[in-house]
Image (tube, helix red, strand yellow):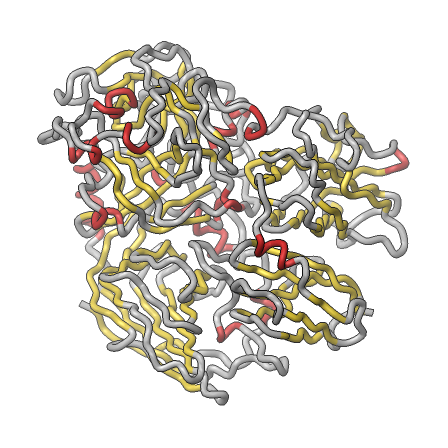
Amino acid sequence: MYKTINTHRMKNRILLLALASSTLSFAQISEGGLPASFQKTMQGDYVDTSIDYQTIELQKPNMAVVLANDIEASEKGKPYQIAKNIAANISIQNSGTWETLSNGDKIWKLALKIADAQALSLYFSVPVSIPEGGKLFVYNKKKTQYLGAFTSETPSFQAMELVQGEVLTLEYFMPNGQELLPTIEISEVAYYYRGVEDRIAIFRDGYAQNYTKAGSCEVNVACSEINGWEEQRDAVVHYSFSSGGGTYVCSGSVVNNTAGDCKPYILTANHCGEPTSNSNITGHIWYFNYQRPTCSPGNTNQYNGARSQTVSGGQLKASSQNGTHVGTGSQVSGADFVLVELNNNIPSSYNPYYAGWDRATSSSNSGVGIHHPAGHDKKISTYTNSLFSSTYNGGWSSAHWGVTWAATTNGHGVTEGGSSGSPLFNTNGLIVGHLSGGSSFCTATSASDLYGKFNKAWELDGNSNNSRLKPWLDPTNSGNMTLAGTYAPCTGGGNNGGGTGSNTLANSCSATSTSCDEYIENVTLNTINKTSSCNNYSDFTSTSTTLQKGQSYDLTVLPAIVNQTSIAYTNDEIAAWIDWNNDGDFTDNGEQIAYVVVAQGWSNIFNFTVPNSATPGVHRMRVRISYQPQGNITNCGSSTSGEVEDYKIVIPGSVGIGENELQNIAIYPNPTKNNIIIDLSTIEEKIFSVELKDITGRLISSKTNVNTKLEFLLENENAGIYIITINAKSGTYTHKVIKL
């Protein structure tokens, strides 16, 4: 049941400055850009959207019943529910409010509300389809979180990730002359009541409060326990799925195959929804890099994990549910595995690690499990005693590995609801199992957990391809017992070890400071846009971007001073290095890409060109600020004042034609006294959006779906440096312009 009320009013001349704050976010694969009602027109005015629009309020679920069912499900080892799905029959044809703008464009808006929801998300009865020129956005009431633009060029979907708050608004832009309506048919609205507290805090409060409901003994993946397991961390994903009127969460891992082709396979547990066909996974939302940047669970700094990077849906390849050991009652089926291939390649900006595996029958004497307990940010659990064979609730005999967890420096990691499906890694960093369940808790740290054996799922769980891992993870019929993991670009299969060579980030000399006064507030390079606080040294190698050989890029380093409005001291030094040959040092020719001493007329934007000699694979980028009177800046060692940050750079094996074209875009006049022209008429590939920002990252203007000349107005802006960002189908190109 739902009722209709009209309480939302589109405000005339919304202030863009408020929308350019660091809490504004979009995710799920989309073109980016801003909703039409957020933007300025070419004349510098804001879009006039001043009419009331419809709000549909759906009935809040009976939470006493929901919570009682959750307790019962927990006792039976069922998946962890975080939302109740409310049935709906809402479409663009039967709901919402249209407005025609003065130029003939149209905007449709609809608000959905469920009282007291921590967040809402949408499920669709058929895939969302957008006609050419149309743009769909979804955003929260505060306009601090938005998803989109979804267009005719972006992947279709039947589920949309969560949006903070009890109200979400859908906004669809239809250009003048377009008569086709999009396909938007909402079948369910998910009412989130737990398991999302950490992720939504940044959008609700402006900072990442410590709302985690995971057990107090759990260990963040930023703690020292992750040392040596950083690659495995980057393979682990959190995901939500719809089943029986609810939304549940589990964990999984990106996994490598012997073709070495970066096929986007994810391994998880069968009992997370028990899928048997593609229709069972249309509502899956996969969240990458949902993790905190520091060990302290109370850290409230903004972090990328809160702005989840997501992919929707997938294709079911194999599961235990299709096998010959189907469980009954509280048993799990077979080795309790599911293998899904995502509908789209995982964006390189997500920096996924394609985990290696070991299908040997021998036990491992030490290793880790990495997972998302209770739907919250990523944790690590450590074992130091040998795995042992076990049987899950009387099911397939000896189809599981038993594990007991060890106390470590920062806690005693265990598993919880939401950890199901997460990988178990052996001593060599290879997957040997996937979590079914168990008895460990923070109040029962010595109890054991059970992981479905990878070697059982390989080809013993069933007789057909849809019940075995082998056809998909060994498509070359290599017969390998083990396969190394890799980052993109995938360069072919291995046969031993945990992933070495150019796809493994080389260790480097340590660098830090003894006191943190001046520090690095923001680093921007291509798709990297990282804001952080003062921390002496920060390992941000989970944050990466892909750069092309021979292409020029602008690195922007924004400094700051603790508790002061000034951004730097005179005689501060800023420098950056990239280890182009991945040999563990920054001393080779061309590896220093930035240097400046803060003085009158200094610039914090550094242009460099990726050398053609750069080794394909992953590379460390080090950024540092220090105070010159205390000693010249160096790439290693400790300084008295300042800060050091490390990032990851990926160099693919070849350069795409489209990205070469982007370098030839004409941007003029530069410098300029007034406006800047960007000529895209010679570019054949799709340009999703073009953005103009100042050096602090403030968005001044954004234009979407353009392939001709366009103009940005700078006459009312202050003199200084500005950044043009062009988001195209093949990649992102940045260019700096100067306003005189």
Q: Is residue 373 above or below residue 24?
A: above
User: Horizontal placement of 62 versus 32: left or right?
Assistant: left
Q: Is residue 219 among what the camera can see?
A: no
- Which residue extends farthest left? 328
Locate residue 88 relative to residue 671 in the image: left or right.
Answer: left
- The image position of residue 251, as x and y in percent, is 34, 36
Q: Position of residue 601 (x, y in %)?
A: 88, 56
Residue 280 percent across, percent down from the top left: 21, 47
Residue 393 in the figure: left or right of residue 716: left
Residue 362 image offset from top left, x and y in percent: 32, 10
> In the depicted view, which residue is nearer to us: 560 or 313?
313
Please give left or right for residue 699 compared with residue 471 in the image: right
Dividing the image into 4 quarters, which one contains the C terminus?
bottom right
Q: Residue at x 48, y 70 (%)?
A: 35
Task: Work out whether 342 lies above or below 474.
Answer: below
Determine if residue 361 is in view: yes
The residue lying toward the viewer, choosing from 138 and 13, is: 138
Q: Which image quadrant for residue 693? A: bottom right
Q: Quadrant of the N terminus?
A: bottom left
Residue at 44%, 48% (x, y): give it: 199
Residue name at image x 30 percent, y 27 percent:
435
Which one is in front, 263 or 55? 263
Quadrant in the rendering for residue 580 = top right
